[in-house]
Image (cartoon, rainbow, N blue to C red):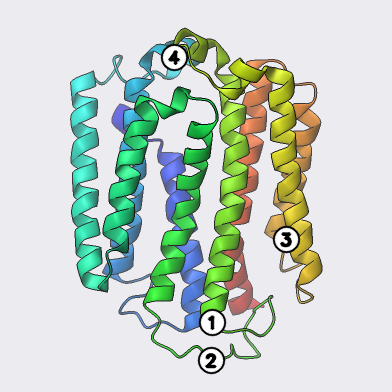
Amino acid sequence: MHFIKLTRPLNLLIIVVTMYGIGWYFEGVYQINSALGIHSFTFFLLVLSTVMIAAAGNIINDYFDIKADRINKPNRVVIGTYINRRTAIFSHWIINLIAFIIALYLSWRLHTYWYLFIHLLTINLLWYYSLKLKRQFFIGNFLIAGLTAIVPLLVGYYFYHIQWIDASEIKANTFYPFGKTRIHDFTLLLTFAISGFAFVLNLAREIVKDMEDVDGDKKLHAKTLPIVLGYKKTKRIVGVILFATVVFSLIIWSVYENLTFKSVLPILISAALIVQCFILLIPAKEKSHFRTINHLIKLAMISGLLMPFYWRIIMIYG
């Protein structure tokens, strides 16, 4: 039970739902057969390897963060309390090894080195982030936000790569809010839009988490934004990032005429949550205040990531 808690199962579940949600929508748009669709063993392995790397990353992050966690969240420290350090580091390498072997299979099965490259790169970046970059000025926040954005890209590339139909115009009766365009272009457009959304919101969330964890980070002589710049300037940066997310969403709604209130409901929910973050961010001073904002940003990100899943439901049920 404690080992499962160490991997942050809720975050892993979000990855699974996001990947299958995006995949389910693309499968409907592309009319993919079951050989390589979301019900295939190949796609399952892609999701599994991604989840395993994320789980191993969570383990190694806690492994290097024991001192800070004993100050920031003493009641949630697992390594050194319930699981010894040797078991944690061994589990981290075993999980990553299995994920790497899966990446080798995927690269062979799909005739591309992409999965081998991205999995190996992610494993090493998560290690280096936990070891050093996490306590550096801004770069750690940027890196984790970027790795989060890779999750939708993996699914988008997967379906872009396995297309079995021509790049023909999408049928008129298909729920396709961006109007008439080619499927290949649509894959890239939607995937990068979702990835960009995940990147920006997670960047803001990582900075808010740093404001929440200032006490422990100071003990490790970290150089996070709130420690270097102070709370006031850091809150302004978070505000600008969140504001950019709302503006970006409004631009999409204004550019694409076919977008309706019904079709963008998850984005509107995200926008409402972000506005709530603005309201709470201004007077925020205590750890509990930043934790609440952290949770709200996470909910906003989940709502946006579920957009393709929501669209597929509309495709089926109208």
Which of the two discs, 1 and 3, labels the residue nearer the N terminus? 1
Q: Image quadrant for the N terminus? A: top left
Which of the two discs, 2 and 4, labels the residue nearer the N terminus? 4
Q: On the image, numbered disc 2 is attached to which residue?
A: 168
* Label 1: few (<14), some (14–19) or many (≥20) C-alpha neighbours in 10 Å: many
Q: On the image, numbered disc 1 is attached to which residue?
A: 183
Q: Is 127 rendered above or below residue 70? A: below
Q: Nearer the viewer, mark 1 or mark 3?
A: 1
Which of the two discs, 2 and 1, labels the residue nearer the N terminus? 2
Which of the two discs, 3 and 2, labels the residue nearer the N terminus? 2
Q: On the image, numbered disc 4 is attached to which residue?
A: 68
| 217 relative position to 181: left or right | left
Find the distance from the CA under tag 4 to the CA under tag 1: 48 Å
| 314 relative position to 19: left or right | right
**Element carrying mark 2:** loop
Residue type, numbered disc 1: Ile
Residue 265, labelled with which disc? 3
| Residue 122 in view (yes/no) | yes
| Residue 5 in view (yes/no) | no
